[in-house]
């Protein structure tokens, strides 16, 4: 892989600065560079282009080490227990890949590094059904999205479907076939979920002809092979333009108006998370693509501290968890789910219309037979949180309440109570604590905080500040009905096209 050019220098004057290198940021940088604009991308996480002492860039899910978590001394696994026993362990503090960011009432998991969430996510690449789009982005023309921007996003991301005959025969998806059978027997519609994993590669993994990644349980702390993360798609094209600098381990902490645009203050970090240098650069245009949480935190801080006082009162508002809730079911002994489970889920149970839940049949890649079916549900929920700046504590806070997940649990029950009753099975109680059925303490899908058409105009231009834009998941009002990254990518494609046509 081509190495990034040297990082941004102090006192640089640049035409366009992009904060964050996830989906929104990568789309923005590519399209700007292709339009002839020089771009600087600033990323607080690491580059993830150099192998560790074990010869691998990314750590395995089952053996976390310092690479696994962002500045923690103990792991914080989403699935905290197994057979009721806590599985978290001590690790050295390091600028690792997965941030388990804790707010009141919720832990928000996010990717840290060049590639953002694409480094750690499950790769499920789902376009919402057209009839549900008005629930996702009511202010956006659906025809444009489904005719142009969703197809563009799917093509650039390299989205593909599993080969049905292989799904039906491989031991690696026995767990999903059991999940499908149970869904079918309770009359729930199921769908094959497209992903950005290279399915040919996975078949070769199964055949033993290439190094294993999905079939070796890699996912949460990065995939060493097979997954088409942004590093392999948008960001590889970004590098090929020769117009983009990427500065890893650089964190934006301040943006304020200045002659020539905006003065941006950036802290350079070492891998212990300490600030080693502070840089100040001037950017004519600044694109916030720090993710829903990152962008929301920056904007509420800048409004409250007087850096950008004219941002409107909508910043920080409308934040949602995409209704994420997890659970497991204990199967009968004759419904073994398999000792080999591909870490990339590819089957969904679609009960959105009837029960407000879309559930992925997820793996439990432990290497042993668990007789468990495990699910991540995306549910319909009206609850939305707000980020505010706590001046005394010097940090942004979110007013989420764990009790708000009750709606999501009930929606998920619309599927799993019925399946349990049909199959004569029960919920697992050992995966999230001691006798705790629901994983209701987290989200993987933060959305909102700078809603399109409210905090920004209908294309992501921040109200009150020409030349400032929001380009990431914070534009979306709390739900994408399905997994979010295809929608985040498509919306960024739509918005940047308009911005390049009118603002440059
Ligand atoms: P994101 O990808 O989070 O990128 C933001 C970037 O900005 C990050 O790299 C940050 O480190 C960086 N940043 C933040 N603050 C600063 C700052 N102050 N200065 C410099 N850099 C900063 O944002 N979605 C799916 O559609 N399918 C899945 O299967 C799926 N599975 C997931 C599994 C896990 C474990 C997780 C954590 C997420 C999953 N997601 C999935 C969610 C998906 O990754 C997420 O919606 C997108 O990554 C969000 O894209 P953004 O561009 O908004």
Image (cartoon, helix red, strand yellow):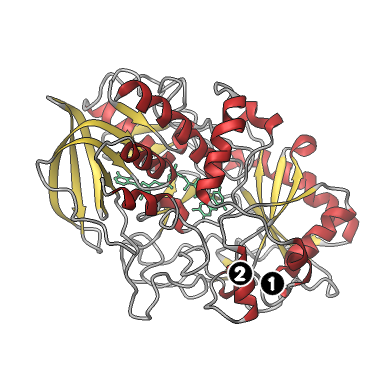
Q: Quadrant of residue 80?
A: bottom right
**Which residue is rendered at x = 61% and y = 74% of the image?**
204
Point out the tag, 1 or 2, that comes first from the N-terminus. 1
Can the viewer see residue 82 in this picture? no
Quadrant the C terminus occupies: top left
Q: Name the residue under label 1.
A: 172
| Pick the front one: 342 or 409 | 342
Q: Where is residue 74 in the image (x, y as percent from the top left)?
A: 40, 67
Say whether marks 1 and 2 touch (CB < 8 Å): yes
Name the side, left or right, on which 225 lies relative to 375. left
Q: Is 253 situated left or right of 386 in this image?
A: left
- The crowd level at tag 1 (other Cα within 10 Å; few <14, some 14-19, many 20+) is many
Vertical comparison of 167 with 450: above or below:
below
124 shown above or below 474? below
Q: Where is residue 488 in the image (x, y as percent from the top left)?
A: 50, 39
- What numbered label is drawn on residue 149? none
Is any part of residue 482 visible from this angle? yes
On screen, residue 440 versus residue 429, left or right, reads left
Task: Give the residue number, with chain letter if any, for mark 2.
Answer: 202
């Amino acid at each position: 892989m081509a190495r990034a050019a040297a990082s941004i220098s102090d006192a640089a004057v640049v035409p366009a600065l992009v904060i964050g290198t996830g989906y929104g940021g990568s789309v923005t940088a590519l399209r700007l560079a292709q339009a002839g604009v020089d771009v600087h991308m600033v990323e607080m996480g690491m580059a993830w282009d150099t192998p560790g002492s074990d010869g691998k860039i990314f750590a395995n899910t089952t053996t976390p080490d310092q690479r696994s978590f962002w500045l923690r001394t103990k792991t914080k696994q989403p699935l905290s227990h197994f057979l009721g026993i806590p599985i978290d362990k001590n690790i050295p503090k390091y600028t690792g890949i997965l941030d388990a960011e804790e707010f009141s009432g919720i832990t928000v998991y996010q990717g840290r590094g060049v590639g953002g969430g694409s480094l750690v996510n499950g790769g499920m690449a789902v376009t919402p059904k057209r009839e549900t789009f008005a629930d996702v982005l009511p202010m956006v023309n659906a025809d444009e999205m489904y005719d142009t921007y969703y197809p563009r996003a799917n093509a650039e991301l390299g989205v593909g479907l599993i080969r049905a005959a292989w799904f039906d025969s491989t031991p690696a998806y026995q767990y999903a076939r059991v999940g499908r059978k149970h869904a079918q027997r309770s009359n729930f519609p199921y769908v094959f979920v497209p992903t950005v994993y290279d399915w040919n590669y996975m078949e070769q993994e199964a055949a033993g002809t290439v190094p294993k990644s999905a079939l070796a349980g890699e996912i949460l702390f990065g995939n060493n092979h097979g997954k088409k993360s942004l590093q392999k798609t948008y960001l590889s094209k970004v590098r090929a333009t020769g117009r983009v600098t990427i500065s890893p381990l650089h964190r934006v902490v301040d943006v304020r108006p200045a002659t020539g645009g905006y003065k941006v203050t950036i802290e350079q970090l070492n891998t212990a998370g300490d600030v080693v240098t502070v840089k100040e650069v001037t950017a004519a245009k600044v694109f916030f693509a720090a993710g829903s949480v990152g962008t929301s935190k920056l904007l509420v801080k800048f409004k409250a501290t007087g850096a950008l006082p004219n941002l409107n009162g909508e910043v920080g508002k409308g934040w949602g968890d995409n209704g994420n809730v997890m659970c497991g079911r204990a199967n009968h002994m004759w419904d073994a789910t398999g000792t080999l489970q591909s870490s990339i889920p590819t089957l969904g149970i679609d009960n959105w219309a009837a029960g407000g839940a879309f559930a992925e049949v997820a793996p439990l890649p432990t290497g042993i037979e668990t007789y468990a079916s495990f699910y991540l549900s995306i549910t319909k929920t009206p609850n939305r949180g707000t980020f505010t700046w706590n001046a005394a504590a010097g940090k942004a806070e979110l007013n989420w309440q764990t009790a708000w997940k009750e709606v999501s649990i009930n929606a998920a029950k619309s599927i799993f109570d019925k399946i349990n009753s049909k199959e004569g099975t029960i919920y697992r109680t050992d995966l999230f604590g001691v006798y705790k059925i629901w994983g209701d303490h987290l989200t993987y899908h933060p959305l909102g905080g700078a809603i399109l058409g409210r905090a920004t105009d209908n294309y992501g231009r921040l109200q009150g500040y020409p030349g400032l834009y929001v380009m990431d998941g914070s534009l979306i009002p709390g739900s994408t009905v399905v997994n979010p990254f295809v929608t985040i990518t498509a919306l960024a494609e739509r918005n940047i096209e308009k911005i390049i046509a009118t603002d440059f």
